[in-house]
Structures are given as structure tokens and as C-alpha cells.
Image (tube, grey):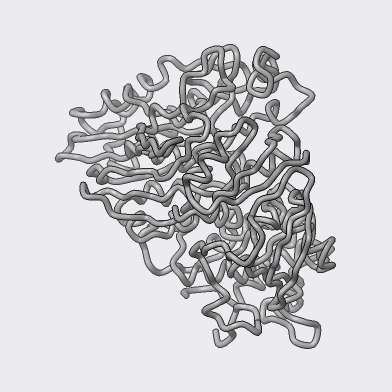
């Protein structure tokens, strides 16, 4: 690990001032950042320790939602009774990721900011446009079984590794940021990760010195929740594909639907295409098939990951059958 | 179970488990150090206050092993993938390789050395021996620290990936639940069936 300066400001303003200095990075849980610093893929000049700032509360909001402090660790989020009863999708997604040890450390804000686990990003001897813009993408012609099928570009086919973020984007979560001079702003999680295009090294819309303070969940949508994750091992593994779904029925008809995917794009992927094909339609396998086809219309396999397209379709259909007890046809 | 599963300590329990961040002590030097500088850190390890001067890059694991010579905690992958370095930090299990010692000034750490001793084994240590829950033994300190915290998590109602209803207050520690909850501790010798049997004897079933 390369040398760095360390500081632990006592308030958010101090943290933001320290974090705005070029070369500085915030550290909270550190479970991804330190991993990357050991490999010298991340090499900040200065670590600004924000782990003791008072951002560990989960609060009710006026509209019946929750405001989650950015430093609430994954385990505390998953066990919170309000989250478990009103947003079971979030608890399910969180406990499907990492290990209990990591979930006790990893923070809500840090989870959103974690880097891809693309093996070429992790290998300094392989060219990578995220590590070195313009260097090229080793995954494009490489072993890309784990890489993206949606939203990628020829410059980068890395996936976002989070499970939690998939649940949050299905729930229309918003990220609250505090910037230099006390400037606050809120941005929808679905707009938090910019398109890949030719700039895969620009992963979020966060500006220098901006600090994630909270994640806001609007009041929960009606319907049953389910997070389904498909992976190579039964536990402690990243998703090949995952589906976050919330569906409500009016009789036999789908009244509302929220659909998001993980493991398939550079960001948690909200599928409005699938949602549009579901709402107002009968809860049948035929409907689910149509929605799955619509969701994957723009999907592009890169060779080894071609299987993700039919796998994601089948995972979505199975999830929807489970949520609606849909008629098997 | 009649056993107190948390390790013995000379501090009252109310001070052992601290989840809320606390203010930085004003008596200490400013919490800032320049590149290459060493940094003062005080850890409470197995009930004892230990003052250290560390390179800020020192992981909590290396502080325990290399500076405090508590080599019971093992270094496996050093990347948070194997769980050999699991310790209890303020009562909760973490991978000590993926955090910096300097971030834990004032925090309480319990390692396997604080869990039990050869003539006063912790109940989980006894059942690991009874059920032969290891072969080479390298992962065992991490397995035991992890299992202690895992049983506390389940008592508190923590759901897992295999919990059918995450909103349920009661956790039934079935074999599937134990396997899932212990998946952050890898055993190269594949002693998993015996590890699960051992843990079930202490904490299986409904909590």
C-alpha cells in the first residue's frame, strides 16, 4: 500500500473541506477502498476518515418514508424493523451480498460508491479504461462471463456489484449530498450513475468534496417484494444476474410494478420497459415473457456472457410467478 | 443455553458494546497525520488498554499480530474473502484485515486470545474439539469468533439470505441458516459438516 496522510475531521464541514483537496478520498467502512489500496489500484494521497460523523441514524420522513444515514452499516440497515417490515426488498438484497463480517463494516453510502469487481479492473497488468482512460478494455475480447449486457459501451463492459443499490433503485431512492459551502442537493439514484459512453472512469455524478449524507426512501409502493439473486455459489458471491421486483395485483390484473436488475449493467438497472409491459395486464406467464423480452431488447452479449440474456429473462419470469402466484400456462 | 456466549472481559457489558460514534477525545493530539507519519492509537484488546504508534497503513489485523503479538488471529487472504482474521470489534464480527488500526482509536477488540484459554475453554471451543470442527486449524480462531457473534446476531433477529420472511422476529437456526450465516469463514480443509454440528450443539434451533 502506498503512503497517505490521514485525518479524522470532527464535523461534516471539516470533512468536506478535507475531501475537496485533490488526491483526497473519504473512508467510512473501507471494505472496498482498502482492498483496492492494497493492490494500489486506489492510491489516495490523503484519507479523510468520516466514519465517526453522526450519520448512523435511520429516521422517519413526513411522507411515510425513511431517511437512512449514509454511514448506517449494511447489517444495521438489514435488521432495522422498519426496513424489514416496510421495505423487505432492501433487507433481502443487503443480506444476499458479501459476508456478515463485511456487512458489519460496509456503509450505505460506500455501498453505492463501490467499484466494479471486473477482474481486469483488478489486474494492474491488463489495460483498463476505468483505471487509465484511453488504455483500452481487456474484458471486451477477454473472459467476459461476468460482464454487462445492458448499458455498456465498447469502452467498458464492467458491472456495478451492489445488491443493495438494485433494491434502492426499484424503490425510487434518492441520494442526499452535502457539498462545499454547505450546498445540499438530492439526486435520484437512477440518475446517480452516468452513462458509460467513452468515460467509464466517471462513475457517479458526485463532485469533489461532496459527501453522501443520506439515502431517502419514499413511502413504500404497494405490493409484494422479492429480491432474487443468481450466482455461481450459494452464498458470498456477486450476482451473475439479479432481479428486484415489487408487484401489486388488482384481482388477476397487475396494478403496479417496479423492476430492477443487478449484475448486468454499470449501474443498478431500472427496467421501465418491463414495468410498462406489466401494468394493466393479466398476471400470466405470457405477460411476464413479454415483459422479459421488452426488458432485454437492447441487451448485447459479448461472448462469454451471452448466457446472461436468457438467464435474466428466466429469473425475471420466475420472480414474477412467485410474487403473483401467476397462472402457469 | 445457560452459557454466556460473549467472551469474558473485565469491563462492564454496557461499555463493551458501543455502536454509536463518540466524540473525539479533546485530550489527544489532533486526529491528523501527514504522509509517512506515525499515528498514536489506543485499542482496548481483550480488556486491556494498549497504546501503539503505528504507520497509518497498518491494518487492524497487522496491529494485533505484528505489534501486539496476538497471533491467534490469522492472516489468510488479507482481502476480506476468507474470514480467518475475524475478530469482535465493539462486540460485532468484522474482517480485521480490511480496516485500519488508526480508525479504531478507543475501540474494543476481542480476539481468540480473549475468548478462552486451554484450561477455561469457551463453550464453542469445547464443541469444536468434541465435533472435530477443523483439520489444520488455521481458520478456527476466525470460525469461533465469527460463530460467537453470529449467535448474538440471530438472537437480535438479524435476517439472512435464507430466512423466508425477513420481517420475522424469530430466527430458527437450521443447518441452512448456519451455513449461510457462517459463509464468510472459509475452511480449506472443508470441515464444514463438523463445524456446523459443533455450532448447532451450542446455538442451534430457535433462539
Left or right of A192 on screen, residue B124: right
Name the residue at 32% across, 36% down. A172
Residue B192 percent location from the top left of the image = 69, 61
Residue A79 versus residue B149 in the image, above or below: above
Residue A202 versus residue B148 in the image, above or below: above
| Extreme-left residue of the structure | A251
Residue A101 versus residue A174 in the image, above or below: below
Left or right of A73 on screen, residue A289: left
Name the residue at 69% across, 34% down. A42
Q: Could you tell me which quadrant the N terminus of chain A lies in?
A: top right
Q: Nearer the viewer, residue A18 or A70?
A: A18
Answer whether residue B186 is visible to the viewer in this image: no
Residue A201 percent location from the top left of the image = 59, 22
Name the residue at 66% across, 51% down. B32
Q: Could you tell me which quadrant the C terminus of chain A lies in?
A: top left
Residue A66 percent location from the top left of the image = 31, 50
Left or right of A260 on screen, residue A209: right
Residue A323 percent location from the top left of the image = 31, 43
Instruction: Please state the total of marks drawn on the protein image.
Output: 0
Q: Quadrant of residue A44?
A: top right
Name the residue at 35% across, 32% down. A188
Amino acid at each position: 500500500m502506498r503512503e497517505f496522510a490521514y485525518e479524522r475531521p470532527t464535523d461534516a464541514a471539516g470533512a468536506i473541506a478535507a475531501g475537496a483537496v485533490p488526491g483526497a478520498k473519504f473512508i467510512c467502512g473501507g471494505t472496498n477502498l482498502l482492498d483496492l489500496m492494497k493492490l494500489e489500484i486506489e492510491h489516495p494521497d490523503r484519507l479523510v476518515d468520516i466514519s465517526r460523523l453522526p450519520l448512523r441514524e435511520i429516521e422517519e420522513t413526513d411522507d411515510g418514508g425513511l431517511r437512512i444515514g449514509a454511514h448506517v452499516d449494511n447489517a444495521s440497515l438489514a435488521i432495522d424493523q422498519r426496513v424489514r417490515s416496510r421495505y423487505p426488498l432492501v433487507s433481502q438484497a443487503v443480506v444476499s451480498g458479501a459476508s456478515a463480517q463485511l456487512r458489519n463494516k460496509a456503509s450505505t453510502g460506500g455501498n453505492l460508491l463501490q467499484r466494479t469487481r471486473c477482474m481486469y479492473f483488478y489486474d494492474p497488468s491488463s489495460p483498463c479504461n476505468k483505471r487509465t482512460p484511453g488504455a483500452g478494455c481487456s474484458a471486451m475480447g477477454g473472459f467476459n462471463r461476468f460482464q454487462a449486457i445492458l448499458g455498456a459501451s465498447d469502452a467498458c463492459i464492467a458491472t456495478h456489484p451492489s445488491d443493495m443499490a438494485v433494491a434502492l433503485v426499484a424503490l425510487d431512492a434518492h441520494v442526499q449530498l452535502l457539498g462545499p459551502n454547505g450546498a445540499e442537493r438530492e439526486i435520484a439514484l437512477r440518475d446517480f450513475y452516468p452513462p458509460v459512453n467513452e468515460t467509464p472512469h466517471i462513475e457517479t455524478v458526485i463532485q469533489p468534496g461532496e459527501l453522501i449524507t443520506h439515502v431517502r426512501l419514499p413511502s413504500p409502493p404497494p405490493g409484494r417484494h422479492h429480491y432474487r439473486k443468481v450466482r455461481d455459489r450459494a452464498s458470498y458471491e456477486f450476482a451473475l444476474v439479479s432481479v428486484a421486483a415489487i408487484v401489486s395485483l388488482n384481482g388477476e390484473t397487475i396494478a403496479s410494478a417496479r423492476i430492477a436488475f443487478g449484475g448486468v449493467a454499470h449501474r443498478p438497472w431500472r427496467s421501465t420497459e418491463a414495468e410498462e409491459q406489466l401494468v394493466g395486464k393479466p398476471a400470466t406467464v405470457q405477460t411476464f415473457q413479454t415483459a422479459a423480452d421488452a426488458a432485454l431488447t437492447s441487451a448485447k452479449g459479448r461472448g462469454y456472457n451471452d448466457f446472461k440474456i436468457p438467464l435474466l429473462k428466466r429469473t425475471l419470469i420466475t420472480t414474477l410467478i412467485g410474487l403473483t402466484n401467476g397462472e402457469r400456462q | 443455553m445457560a452459557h454466556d456466549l460473549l467472551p469474558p472481559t473485565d469491563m462492564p457489558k454496557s461499555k463493551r458494546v458501543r455502536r454509536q460514534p463518540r466524540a473525539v477525545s479533546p485530550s489527544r493530539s489532533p486526529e491528523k497525520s501527514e504522509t509517512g507519519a506515525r499515528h498514536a492509537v489506543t485499542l482496548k484488546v481483550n480488556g486491556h488498554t494498549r497504546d501503539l504508534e503505528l504507520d497509518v497503513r497498518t491494518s487492524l489485523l497487522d496491529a494485533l499480530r505484528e505489534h501486539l503479538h496476538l497471533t491467534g488471529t490469522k492472516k489468510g487472504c488479507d482481502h476480506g474473502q476468507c474470514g480467518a482474521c475475524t475478530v469482535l470489534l465493539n462486540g460485532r464480527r468484522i474482517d480485521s484485515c480490511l480496516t485500519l488500526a488508526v480508525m479504531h482509536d478507543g475501540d474494543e477488540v476481542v480476539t481468540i486470545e480473549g475468548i478462552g484459554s486451554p484450561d477455561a475453554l469457551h463453550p464453542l471451543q469445547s464443541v469444536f474439539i468434541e465435533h472435530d470442527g477443523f483439520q489444520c486449524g488455521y481458520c478456527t480462531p476466525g470460525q469461533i469468533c465469527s460463530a460467537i457473534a453470529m449467535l448474538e446476531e440471530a438472537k437480535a433477529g438479524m435476517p439472512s439470505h435464507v430466512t423466508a420472511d425477513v420481517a420475522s422476529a424469530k430466527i430458527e437456526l437450521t443447518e441452512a441458516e448456519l451455513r449461510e450465516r457462517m459463509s464468510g469463514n472459509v475452511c480449506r480443509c472443508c470441515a464444514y459438516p463438523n463445524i456446523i454440528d459443533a455450532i448447532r450443539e451450542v446455538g442451534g434451533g430457535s433462539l
